[in-house]
Amino acid sequence: MLTDVSGIGLSLLAIWFAQRSPTSERTFGYLRLEIFAAVANAVLLLGVAAFILFEAWQRLSAPPDVAPGLMLGVALIGLAANGIGLVLLRDAQRTSLTVRGAYIEVMGDFAGSLAVIVAALVIAATGFVAADAIASVFIAALILPRTFALLRDATDVLLEATPKGVDMDHVRRHILEAPGVIDCHDLHAWTITSGMNVVSAHVTIENGADPAITLDALCACLSDDFDIEHSTFQLETADRRRLEERSHA
């Protein structure tokens, strides 16, 4: 529960910082703090899972005395508290990596409380105290896959990988279909923070094309078809492409 409080507190702190206005030194403000918080939560979860597995191994090697009544009572309280937490975080975790990290922590504890309840009942009925350690291994097994997924998603954002759900070939085709466009290069897409995808590209237009019409079509295309509100296009003519390739050589 202490790790839950730490994870949720870190998430709230990141969200609070992210609401600060951009400055000339930080033109995107503190939006990326959400991703760092998600990474920190993932590392915290991995540490918790490793500790649980270590404790379970020790308990399997030398089973301690277990008070099933106290164990059951604490687990029931934990189940209720974590159930409330899951309901509160359920919708927000779909759009925020930070909240997803906190959600995974609470969900792991919720499942853990269920496992502890079962283990307490087994111990009370049969005296099989190893059920306590087995329940711990089950809890760690639930935490690890989702934690690795969270860490992978957060790392992808930090590495400015192409956002999930964005097909770059599809984006390129839409750009080339805009009026006056004859080519597209240096096309990049990345994520600033959860729900904020960004695209930049150099777009070659034909002679005589109206840049304003082309730009409006490009922005509308990305906004409507790909839900990308932040886009930067450098419009250039075919002769400019030759000069640009020379500068890159």
Image (cartoon, rainbow, N blue to C red):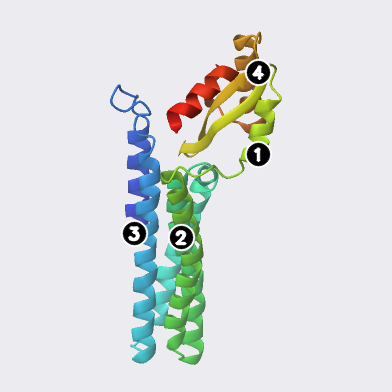
Q: State the CA–CA distance, disc 2 to disc 1.
A: 30 Å
| Upstream in sequence: badge 3 or badge 4 | 3
Amino acid of disc 4: Ala
Q: Is residue 66 visible?
A: no
Q: Which residue is mark 3?
A: 3
Q: Residue at (60%, 28%) from the top-left corner? A: 184
Q: Give me the disc on residue 169.
A: 1
Instruction: Write down the residue under mark 2.
Output: 147
What distance separates the C-alpha of mark 3 from that of mark 4? Answer: 48 Å
**How many angstroms separate mark 1 from mark 4 (CA)?**
18 Å
Which residue type carries mark 2?
Thr
Outermost residue to the left:
25
Q: Position of residue 61 (x, y in %)?
A: 36, 91
Task: Give the CA distance from mark 2 to mark 4.
Answer: 40 Å
Local crowd at mark 4 within 10 Å, few (<14), some, or many (≥20)? some
In front of the other: 131 or 160: 160
Residue toward you, 112 or 125: 112
From the viewer's perspective, is residue 24 above or below residue 152?
above
Residue 65 in the figure: left or right of residue 78: left
Query: Which of the two discs, 3 and 4, sits closer to the camera?
Result: 4
| Tags 2 and 1 touching, CB below 8 Å | no
Please tell me which residue is depicted at 28% across the width and 26% down the height of the picture.
Answer: 25
Which of the two discs, 1 and 3, labels the residue nearer the N terminus? 3
Percent position (x, y) of residue 146? 50, 60
Q: Earlier in the sequence, mark 3 or mark 2?
A: 3
First in residue order: circle 1 vs circle 4: 1
Name the residue carrying label 4: 217
Q: Amino acid at mark 1?
A: Asp
